[in-house]
Amino acid sequence: MLEKIFAAEAVAEALEIFKNEFPLAVWETFYVTILATLFACILGLPLGILLVAGDKNGVLPLPAWLYNTIGVIVNLLRSVPFLILMIMVFPLTRLIIGTTVGTTASIVPLTIAAFPFIARLVETSLREVDPNILEAAQSMGCTPMQIICKVMLPESVPSLISNLTIAITTILGYSAMSGIIGGGGLGKIAINYGYYRYRYLVMLMAVVLLILMVQIFQTVGTAIAVKNDKRLKH
Amino acid sequence: MIEIKNLSKTFQGSSGQVEALKNVNITIPDGDIFGIIGMSGAGKSTLVRCINMLERPTEGQVLIDGQDIGALSETELRQVRKDVTMIFQGFNLLMQRTVLKNVCFPMELVGKKGPAARERAMELLKIVGLESKADAYPAQLSGGQQQRVAIARALATDPKVLLCDEATSALDPNTTHSILELIRDINENMGITVIIITHQMSVVEDVCRHVAILDGGEVVEQGNVSEVFARPQSAAARRLVFPEGESGTVIAGNPDEKLIRVVFNGANATQTPLIATMAMEKGIAANICYASTRNIGERTFGSMLLGIPGGDEKVKEAISYLQELPDVLAEEVSVNA
């Protein structure tokens, strides 16, 4: 089997594919991941703030029914497997992008799948802020908005960055999955060549590149988080 | 002036109601350093949080300069909180901001920014002796330094009242002393009324002029620190003033002796060998069961528990003899088993 995968002509063919198709695929994966993360943050960050601030002991308590409804919706969206979700949001994708196939189209289901996840990550980060610091802010006459914008968010920046890194790497993984139903990028190459045409070497290359991308995102993310953590004595 | 009137606070716990404060009445004059002392669970922290309405009382009022702050809207209350600032046991600084930006924070909340705010913050840091640490982050400072930053931050809005919630409990004795000195300086130089919540008698002795003793949510005693110290009336006060002087624990020995408490204050008393002179002049051989001296303000206070043998007559004689000496108080105390 191994001799077959690494046979001279297979290697030559793989290198040819690598040269012709991989640069675009890497770029597609990159931009889908970044854009989907961006849109998911735009939806997920306020939602995460709401999940903390709207708590009955939070700084801006919401009516219990509303708070519970938000929680249930977030959980619902998080429990649908990504492949199913992608198909379920086809109508929405068509409405926004005009088509359900292609690299750009996969941004919609990725965003829908990722924003509840990001909301929960933001919630976790914000809950880490020492409640005594919030009390101190209250004792200084902070409004609820000031507590959110000037205390909770800035104090949890390192944790938010760490969690954002987790989100990016997860979305990168999802974006590869979207190759099955017409999304672009490294996932598409891995499935089209590896699964449908038995070009295992090409699939292997795509996987190695995905791993590399995850490594780069994680390393950069961790470095930024550490650099921004003023609780560490350096 | 801060008047706390008939203040009660009841918490709805899972196992029924908990009365944290019961009908508390305290008046704190302007410019005072007022101590509120009690064991843990006595309701001190709840009481101090009622003064700036971080905790809403169940009943009663808090009047600051005649204004009932419990009746204010949230917006008006935020205004009051610029005048009644607070420091905490855990310092509670913003860990992601530099020292300078921490001090700027309360000014930022009221829209005071830029060079004017920075200049004011530097002035305050100078007062607390940390201008060299302006660009450091709180994590790089010691506990005492962090509390100094917290004090500078609390002064940024030119408050009238400073609330200190166990502000020195996390610090070692030397640092505690220097923080208390800073608080006293601020009180004297800026005329800020200071309310100190603590469980340590030494803190009250060090800086407070008046004290209220809180026990089980009630004020059991209040007045001048020197008076409360000289004649603690309540059991709670005695526990705090003479932690190791509880009658039951000291006089394990002599059942035929009667106990008298002798309290002396001032240099006159400390220069007289009063036990020796009593023995020589009256022939009463007092048995010292407990003795201690401490400095409060500029005066030296001492207290002793003496065991007097020979029955009621001798006790009366001893008390009248000791009472005649200047600055000495003597009274018979009953022995609680």
Image (cartoon, coloured by chain):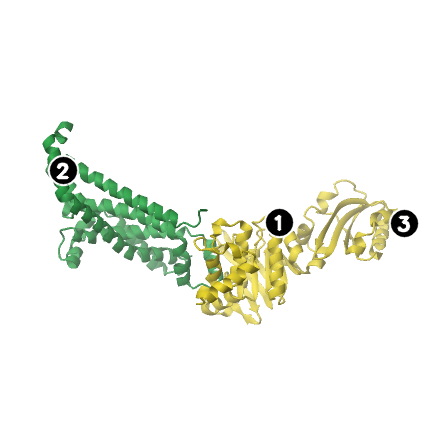
C-alpha distance separating marks 1 and 2? 73 Å
Q: Chain of mark 1?
A: B
Q: Quickly name the residue at label 2.
A: A15
Identify which residue, A15 or B254, lies in the foreground.
A15
Q: Quickly name the residue at label 1.
A: B174
Q: Are marks 1 and 2 on the same chain?
A: no
Q: Colour of chain B?
A: yellow
Q: Amino acid at mark 3?
A: Glu
Residue B281, which numbered label?
3
From the image, state whether disc 3 or disc 2 is nearer to you.
Answer: 2
Q: Quadrant of the N terminus of chain B?
A: bottom right
Left or right: A5 with respect to A208? Answer: left
Q: Amino acid at mark 2?
A: Leu
Q: Amino acid at mark 1?
A: Asn
From the image, state whether disc 3 or disc 1 is nearer to you.
Answer: 1
Is residue A123 visible to us here? yes
- Residue found 17% across the figure and 55% down from its top: A93
3 or 1: tag closer to the N-terminus: 1
Give the x, y percent position of residue B156.
51, 63
- Residue found 49% across the figure and 70% down from its top: B72
B256 shown above or below A107? above
